[in-house]
Image (cartoon, rainbow, N blue to C red):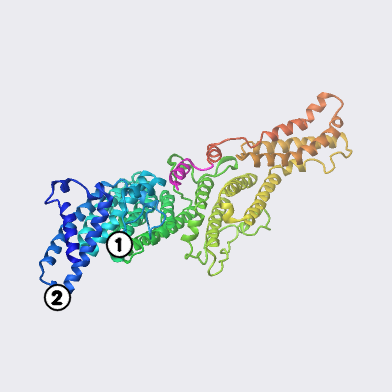
Amino acid sequence: MIDQIIESAAVLVMKWDPESSSYAKVTSLFYESKAEAHQFIKCVGDLQKAMHFMVSDESFSSSDKLVLAQSLMQIAMKRLQKEFYQILSMNRAYLDPESMSTRSSRASARSSVSEFEDDGGTTTDDDIRVAGDSISEVEQVSITAMEELRSIAECMISAGYAKECINIYKIIRKSIIDEGIYRMGVEKMSNSQINKSNWQVLEIRIKNWLEAVKIAMKTLFNGERILCDHVFSSSDSIRESCFADISREGALLLFGFPELVAKSKRLPEKMFAVLDMYSAIFENWPEIESIFAFESTSAVRSTAYNSLVRLADFVRDTLSDFESSIHKDHLHLHDREHHHSWKKSPPGGGVHRMTVHVMNRLSLLADYGEILVDIFRDWPPPAKYSISLPGSFFDNTSSADSSDESQFPAPPSPSPSPSPPLAISLRLAWLILVLLCKLDGKSKKYDDVSISYLFLANNLNHVLSKVRTSNLQYLLGDEWVARHEAKLRQFTASYERLAWGKVLASLPENPAAAMSPEEAKTAFKNFNSSFEEASRKQRSSSVPDSKLRDEIQRSVSRRIVTVYREFYGAHRITVGNSERQVRATVKFTPEDVGNYLSDLFFVTSESERFSSSCSSSPSESTHRRHWRIR
């Protein structure tokens, strides 16, 4: 039997020996005939078994047959080594990571084509064509190549030639990983290079990185792990070693970049880029742990985790900086030309630029609710805050027109371990509270108290509008919205009373009650003067939001025009018999008053143009579209 095995092996092995046959030198065994390739693999396996038997039997220890078998084995291994290289090289397009990543199972990426058998069965070219009828040509070539590589690898490893096989595999497949990382725009950078890069350049690199992570995890590393697991399925240690050596350098480069960004100078405009980088790693974490599960790839997991930690620190610190900038009334502006007007309160009680800027940022932050919950999961709110704020923002029962200021008590600390969603909700609510209280201080700069309340109403209305139209509503809750809507009604009621209360008070309590001509003249004159004075003071008032403007106009008109119309109808003829006497006393018809009130609040200043045109500021809305690529 040994003689027969050696004789059969000699015929087939020497046929495909490149040194003894010019035909074998230029032709691929596996390309030329799948059936003969299967025979070759089986022949080598039989030869190896025969050699093991001869080595274990002392009578064969110095036999020429053993020497011949060893020689044939070396020739066969060189042939298989050549075939392994050719299959890897010629099928790069079919063994690309994207094709590999579509396989249903990484652990056992078995082909639907009949596998090579070790039991002596035969697989013909016709068998493979029949099996491949139901799959695409690309997938069929890919599956076939994977099976051929696996059969060669198992044969060489079994024969003790694992090193030669592994070296070829690592060289070719590592070049694919490295080339893929490079083509995705991920390059090695140092801390100093990151710090020296201006934001526009770094922005492009981060954008490239975000796209690269998406592709790398879905296709590049995932596909390579599938292929490596399949080709070296016969040896856990070899497939671990191969994948680690192939992927480690590229993966460390990829997942090390975010940490460099997070360690660079904190700038407000980096916030959303950093959040997207955190999201990319956070969302791919299960895949990172699964693909790089080996002990030899633990450095990749550690690097990705360290980047998460650093990015989270960056977000927390930047959010603290943001709170501090509100306290100090010094927010970073992209729009430099308007920076000089930052601390000025807008004329007419309009929406302050600070309100627009802060709410734009918070509404964008709210889109990252799940990510922020994770970032602040183990970062409880501070035990107390020290800041002097007007108490009316905490006490909703206080009088809306109270001008007293009191020392704010520190916001009650949540439970020692608040739930993560509650923790981020409290932080966002606190930032809005800081803003509102800062605005309360700015409202005191108006000479007219009524405009102060119109200013507070406009700004709180803008805050509520941004909350209702963003994810802030879900984070803050309906109770928060209802409480601040009540506060908004208090502000508008205070404005109406302070701005138009004297006008209403100038009319008799019972406008239709009988009165003498002199009493009627006095009442009309009082109304005229108070209405003119109020109109003069309110001429520059502004309400950018059309809904709030209509509500205030209707409310003021309902209270003044209704009463004045009744008084006008009952006493217009009382002041005199002639039209001349009437015109001398009665300056306004009810229609005149109504028309004037309907024209209120349309004054548009630079501040109003900014607030009404910017549901989000130009720089940040562009920034948001740029970063939300998931």
Q: Is residue 250 left or right of residue 318?
A: left
Residue 58's disc number: 2
Quadrant of the image containing the N terminus:
bottom left
Identify the amino acid type marked 2: Glu
How far across and down, in percent of the image, does residue 109 sit?
37, 57
Q: Answer yes or no: is residue 142 visible.
A: yes
How far across and down, in percent of the image, does residue 481 sit?
63, 53
Q: Nearer the viewer, mark 1 or mark 2?
A: 2
Closer-to-camera residue (447/172): 172
Q: Is residue 620 magenta?
A: yes
Residue 239's disc number: 1
Closer-to-camera residue (420/568): 420
Q: Is residue 282 magenta?
A: no
Which quadrant would residue 605 be assigned to in this image? top right
Lower sequence index among marks 1 and 2: 2
Q: Find out whether the residues at labels 1 and 2 contact each other: C-beta distance under 8 Å.
A: no
Is disc 1 placed on a helix, strand or loop? helix
Closer-to-camera residue (161/514): 161
Q: Considering only vertical position in the picture, is 370 above or below 354?
A: below
Q: Answer yes or no: is residue 339 visible.
A: no
How far across and down, in percent of the image, does residue 314 sit?
41, 57
How far across and down, in percent of the image, does residue 456 sit?
61, 48
